[in-house]
Image (cartoon, rainbow, N blue to C red):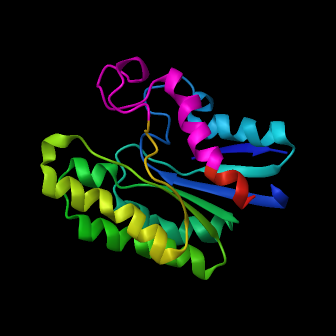
């Protein structure tokens, strides 16, 4: 878990990022180079002060996030939750209904404490089949509507499938992609601040 101090939208505000390898800066030599670290710098440059807690874990599935959310909320008392989970559920072929239930419960628990939520949508490669892909992708906009959350439809827009932005595994964004991811998050995050 990393803390990035950026001079919040109100004194002492905390932004909690709960995600997987994409938010954990997987494969980058320094976590500060990931989109979460760049977001902390962006906040600082705009004069908004917040502490950003990156509780992302590579390989995390939605069930893991659900198992950890209560402790994270109690420990960090965030004003805002950026939720970036689900890709690993899809890559493992887990039922989208289970992912939806887990993510929905994470969001509900945060909302009960007055935490604002920004949900980051994901897609998976087409080789999982049209029906599964459609079921998977439909989870994110449905949850955003149900929970009244701010929403980025696809965090990897313009990055996924673009070789210049991907590491050798063809899945994880490289250092050059991180500013693209940060801008997509910032566009939806700024109005919440």
Asked if residue 100 lies left or right of residue 22, the reply is left
Q: Which residues are magenta?
A: 158-187
**Residue 158 locus on image (x, y percent):** 44, 32
Residue 67 visible in the current orientation: no
Residue 161 lies within the magenta run? yes
**Residue 141 locus on image (x, y percent):** 41, 64
Question: In which quadrant is the C terminus drawn?
Answer: bottom right
Q: Nearer the viewer, residue 174 or 151?
A: 151
Q: Nearer the viewer, residue 140 or 172?
A: 140
Above/below status of 3 relative to 34: below
Above/below status of 18 relative to 112: above
Residue 174 lies within the magenta run? yes
Asked if residue 54 lies left or right of residue 64, the reply is right
Asked if residue 27 lies left or right of residue 136, the reply is right
Q: Nearer the viewer, residue 157 or 24?
A: 157
**Residue 95 locus on image (x, y percent):** 20, 64
Asked if residue 171 lies left or right of residue 74, the reply is left
Residue 47 visible in the current orientation: yes
Above/below status of 28 relative to 136: above
> Looking at the image, which residue is at 46% across and 77% down?
146
Q: Nearer the viewer, residue 71 or 31?
A: 31
> Looking at the image, which residue is at 12% across and 49% down?
129
């Amino acid at each position: 878990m990393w803390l990035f101090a950026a001079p919040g939208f109100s004194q002492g505000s905390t932004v909690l990022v709960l995600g997987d390898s994409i938010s954990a800066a997987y494969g980058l030599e320094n976590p500060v180079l990931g989109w979460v670290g760049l977001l902390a710098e962006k906040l600082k440059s705009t004069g908004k002060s917040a502490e950003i807690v990156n509780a992302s874990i590579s390989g995390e599935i939605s069930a893991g996030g659900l198992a950890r959310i209560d402790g994270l909320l109690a420990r960090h008392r965030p004003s805002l939750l950026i939720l970036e989970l689900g890709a690993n559920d899809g890559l493992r072929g887990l039922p989208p209904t289970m992912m939806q239930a887990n993510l929905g419960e994470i969001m509900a628990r945060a909302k009960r404490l007055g935490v604002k939520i920004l949900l980051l949508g994901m897609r998976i490669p087409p080789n999982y089949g049209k029906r599964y892909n459609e079921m998977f992708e439909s989870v994110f906009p449905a949850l955003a509507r149900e929970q009244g959350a701010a929403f980025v439809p696809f965090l990897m827009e313009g990055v996924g499938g673009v070789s210049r932005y991907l590491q050798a595994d063809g899945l994880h964004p490289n250092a050059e992609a991180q500013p693209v991811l940060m801008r997509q998050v910032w566009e939806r995050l700024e109005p919440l601040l």
